[in-house]
Amino acid sequence: MDDLRRIERTTDMNDSKISAKGVQVYYGDTHAIKDVSVEIGDKTVTAFIGPSGCGKSTFLRCLNRMNDTIDICRVQGSITMDDQDIYDPRVDPVQLRAKVGMVFQKPNPFPKSIYDNVAYGPKIHGLARNKADMDGIVEASLRRAALWNEVKDRLDSPGTGLSGGQQQRLCIARAVATAPEVLLMDEPCSALDPIATAQIEELIDELRQQFSVVIVTHSMQQAARVSQKTAFFHMGHLVEFNDTDQIFTNPQDPRTESYITGRIG
């Protein structure tokens, strides 16, 4: 069984989806990310772990240019997706974010119906030719987010009326509706109870069959459960990046070992 899991963990690892080289991020005079280089695999779950303020969420937001929305933020270095520079001036950040979806800490459905929450992105990007097309996209997205059976009879109800775990799955459905290639998740379970957390974790494992998933998590147990690769950040540096099993059983850097054994962070 272990061998099977190991085989499963190494599948498709060789295909790099996002490549970052020498990335520096400044907030005004604060140097938040210091010379980070990393290869993020396709159809793989990559976890970013580290103490609060270590830069993991800041780096995650570089991957879909969310830092562009912060005036004092400067990003240097190179980040490519499928060998294309995502910071090239010709790249439209809105189009990029259709390809690199994001799910946040707190579920944040729009104050619209469940249907309209999911249809919003495809509508903006012109992905549906007609109502039947859109119905198909909405259903497929809700199925991918393991929410369809719970909401199919009340698609006109407000998304904000769902439970916390359902709202987060709705946000995942909304993110996958634009047919992205990468899904970024910034502590997607931190506001959820254990049962809802387990559902999201199971879902993440299914989503990696189709997407490259990058998850920032405070929970080392969660990183160990859902990811194949783990990156440990500390004080703006990427200290160590390796197979998840390796990071948790045989870390190479003493800072990583201190963090996973609970001495720092």
Image (cartoon, rainbow, N blue to C red):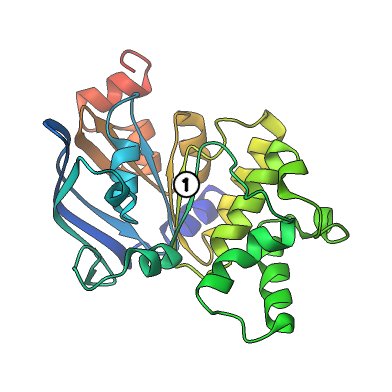
As displayed, is residue 126 above or below residue 27? below
Q: Quadrant of residue 216?
A: top left
Q: Nearer the viewer, residue 244 or 205?
A: 205
Q: Quadrant of residue 155?
A: bottom right
> How many numbered callouts?
1
Q: Position of residue 86 (x, y in %)?
A: 25, 65
As displayed, is residue 180 above or below residue 40? below
Say whether residue 188 is left or right of residue 35.
Answer: right
User: Looking at the picture, which amino acid does disc 1 mark?
Assistant: Met
Q: Position of residue 205 (x, y in %)?
A: 57, 53
Q: Position of residue 71 (x, y in %)?
A: 24, 44
Is residue 21 in view from this perspective? yes
As displayed, is residue 145 above or below residue 86? above
How would you rate the neighbour count of disc 1 (Cα within 10 Å): few for under 14, some for 14-19, many for 20 or more? many
Q: Quadrant of residue 138?
A: bottom right
Is residue 162 in view from this perspective? no
Say whether residue 72 is left or right of residue 248.
Answer: left
As displayed, is residue 219 above or below residue 119? above
